[in-house]
Image (spheres, grey):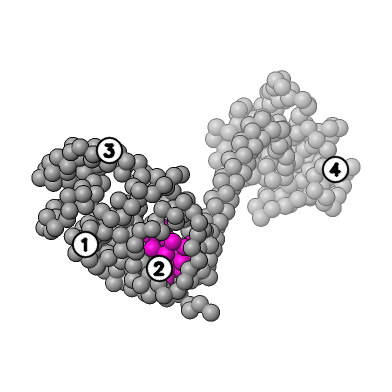
Amino acid sequence: MAAAAKQFDESLVNFYEERLVSRADAVYRFAFALTLSLDGAQKCTERTFREVAANLEKIHGSGEPNVAAVLLAYCWRAYQDLKSQNFPEGQSAVTKALKPIALEPRAALAAVDIVGLAPADAAKVLAWQERDLRTHLAVARKALMMSSLDV
Amino acid sequence: MAQPSPDQSSLSTQDFLLAYLAEYLDGELPRELKDRVEALVKTPGQEEIPGHFQAMRGRLQLAMQSYYLKENEIQTIRNYVQDPSVKATQENIKIEALGRKELISTLMRRLSLVAIAAAIIGVLVWQFGPKREAKFKPLEFLGYEALALEEDPRDRLDLPSSDMNEIKQYLSAYPGLDFKPKVLGQIHEAWKPEGATIIDYEIAKVALVQFGHAQSKEKLFHFSYAGALKDLPKAEPGNIGGLVFQTYSSDDLNLIAFEGPKGVVSILAGRRAAPELAEIAKDGSK
């Protein structure tokens, strides 16, 4: 049974709705790129927002303008917690294009080329040096260019 | 704007190109890095890399657009912060408040319209509707008139005259009278005629002959108008020497009413007792 939602004041509820929930699809796409699974992406997104809700005052109080980076950082941690689970992978063209790419390059590609973070911000989200982020990014882009992704 | 990485030298040439390609294509590289990427994409075999990458990145972004949360999944993550029952209650309160506001506004509008319509109808009825005819109340009107004349007779008589013939002539020749006023003949010599007038109430015209007592300043007023004795409030009838009359009184005056000729009612008002007024009327009616 789900725990009752914590009660927040109106400004926090508005911040959550307007700034964070409005970017839920970006989180979901990032999570999908990590898990390559619709089920995994949903569970990862839900866990992300559960953690975000639990830390809502802290996030709001930090004044961090790049809320997409904050959300992806929580999502990355949520994925670390869930990655031991085996999520059923799909057969979509995107899955086929991303599956050959290792997790870290895929994460870099998703953060920068799918969600649209700047590489420096993506490096912070993934807790890497920017040099490592760019190395992973180069690997992922090379693989993407070699894929047969067609839509 | 992207800042140059301090560790860019550790990337291989192609990794460097791929690592910075998106920012190069998006025009977000500082000059130093831009020149370097530009030099690399011009080297043989690399010319097609930017275009191909841009196409594949576009396909990837387009394909990812088909991945999104369903409404119930969005609702689930909303519920982490706001209890759905609390939210529903708040929304219901807002809807109720809006509903109340709308209801009051509608009622006010309707009331205003009804008030305007009622005002218009009222004005139309007042302006064009049938005029209610004011009712002639002889006892009330003439009692008041007698008191007013008694108090201040100046300028109230159109014909101040002590000549009874002149008074008779004046009343019989008065234009627009639809009855022939009763004029008392010879009454007790102590009562002298002082004049006559026609009181026009619009709803009725009343002929008045005023008498004054020779020894005192006491007045006697003889009113006559078109009407019937039966139209007056019922009173105990009296009869003196064949003169049938009805008696009325107020705090100040006594009035007797009698009929004759037919269709003309006379009211004699004064401070004398009713039988005495009746005697005077009988004498004058001979």
**Same chain check for tags 1 and 2:** yes
Is B191 in front, or is A102?
A102
Residue assigned mark 2 = A49
Where is residue A70 drawn, in percent x and y? 30, 64
- Check whether the beta carbons of the residues at disc 1 and disc 3 lie within 8 A of each other: no
Residue at 72%, 52% in the rendered image: B249
Q: CA distance from mark 4 to mark 1?
A: 124 Å
Residue B19 part of the magenta-drawn span? no
- Write down the chain letter for disc 2: A
Q: CA distance from mark 3 to mark 4?
A: 125 Å
- Write down the chain letter for disc 4: B
- Of badges 4 and 1, nearer the viewer stands 1
Label 2 Cα crowd, 10 Å radius (few <14 / some 14-19 / many 20+): many
**SS at badge 3:** loop
Q: Is residue B124 left or right of residue B49?
A: right
Label 4 Cα crowd, 10 Å radius (few <14 / some 14-19 / many 20+): few
Q: Is residue B44 visible?
A: yes
**SS at badge 2:** helix
Residue assigned mark 4 = B230
Residue A47 part of the magenta-drawn span? yes
Looking at the rendering, the stretch of residues picked out in magenta corresponds to A28-51
Residue assigned mark 3 = B48
- Write down the chain letter for disc 3: B
- Check whether the beta carbons of the residues at disc 2 and disc 4 lie within 8 A of each other: no
Mark 1 or mark 2: whose residue is earlier in sequence: 2
